[in-house]
Image (spheres, rainbow, N blue to C red):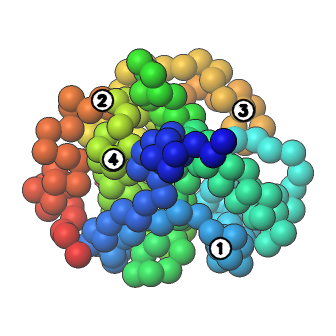
Amino acid sequence: MQPARYDLESRHPGWPSHLGPLRVAAGTVELRPIRLRDAGEWSRIRLRDQAHLERWEPTSPGPWQERNSFWSWPSQWLALRGLARRGQCLPYVITVDGEFAGQITVGNVIRASLRSAWVGYWVSSTVVGGGVATGSVALVVDHAFGAAGLHRIEATVRPENEPSIRVLSKAGFRKEGLFQRYLDVAGDWRDHFCFAITAEETGPGLVRRLIDAGHAERA
Ligand SMILES: CC(C)(COP(=O)(O)OP(=O)(O)OC[C@H]1O[C@@H](n2cnc3c(N)ncnc32)[C@H](O)[C@@H]1OP(=O)(O)O)[C@@H](O)C(=O)NCCC(=O)NCCS
């Protein structure tokens, strides 16, 4: 017997969804579900931005050129789409003025009495320093605590990654501690700070706070 439609939907409240628009210094930021046809732009940007991205990303087998080729996107898209359909992640593309500009993913979604997940992100080198990551984190966290029904979002970041630490601090995350030799990044086990935020800490919402602080405007 087919489950009722509401049963299917309620397995993953808040997905699929489009978030934004939000205007930041770099342009108008929107978040939308990843698509198979993102292969071209995803690959073009990531091949060009190897130096900007590789030292912060989890170690994977094979050379960067291979892992980020046009033909490696379909399997990644399929895996993320499968997790999204099972209610385990919310995988978004970040667009700036309608153009592909990065990814932000809410992953390892756990429900029941934990209602927790992590957030991870990267943006194209052409828009760094323009508030895109901070705006995207604010949009996604408000959604995670709203329609998606979560309670806690965690982010882990290497102590050397000053731009990302700044993003999390500006968005309102709290530093909880240091995970030693936590993750295999760029070929070795790296310490990571753990940052987190819970629904009670967001007040009027992270987007509202960014706007009130003059870092963003409603588009
Ligand atoms: C980290 C990253 C997502 C930031 O994206 P972004 O869109 O540039 O972020 P924002 O513009 O919202 O904020 C960046 C902040 O870091 C600051 N910053 C940049 N370089 C810095 C540095 N070397 N030291 C300290 N602060 C720095 C910027 O000035 C800005 O703060 P401000 O608004 O107070 O001026 C982007 O650099 C990236 O994709 N890096 C590679 C992948 C990565 O590190 N992902 C995160 C893994 S945890």
Labels 4 and 3: the sequence-earlier one: 4
Q: Is residue 111 above or below residue 142?
A: above
Taking the spot 68% from the left edge, 76% from the top edge, the residue there is: 37
Q: Decide: marks 1, 2 in contact (CB < 8 A)? A: no
Q: As shown in the figure, which amino acid type bears the numbered disc 1? A: Asp
Q: Quadrant of residue 74?
A: bottom right
Q: Which residue in the protein does label 4 denote?
A: 147
Q: Nearer the viewer, residue 1 or 117?
A: 1
Taking the spot 23% from the left edge, 54% from the top edge, the residue there is: 207
Labels 1 and 3: the sequence-earlier one: 1
**Tag 4's secondary structure?**
loop
Separation (CA) of disc 4 from disc 1: 26 Å
**Tag 3's secondary structure?**
strand
Residue at the extreme front: 1
Q: Is residue 90 above or below residue 193?
A: below
Q: Decide: marks 2, 3 in contact (CB < 8 A)? A: no
Separation (CA) of disc 4 from disc 3: 33 Å
Q: As shown in the figure, which amino acid type bears the numbered disc 2? A: Thr
Q: Which mark is residue 198?
A: 2
Q: Which residue in the protein does label 3 denote?
A: 184
**Nearer the camera: disc 1 or disc 3:** 1
Separation (CA) of disc 2 from disc 3: 27 Å
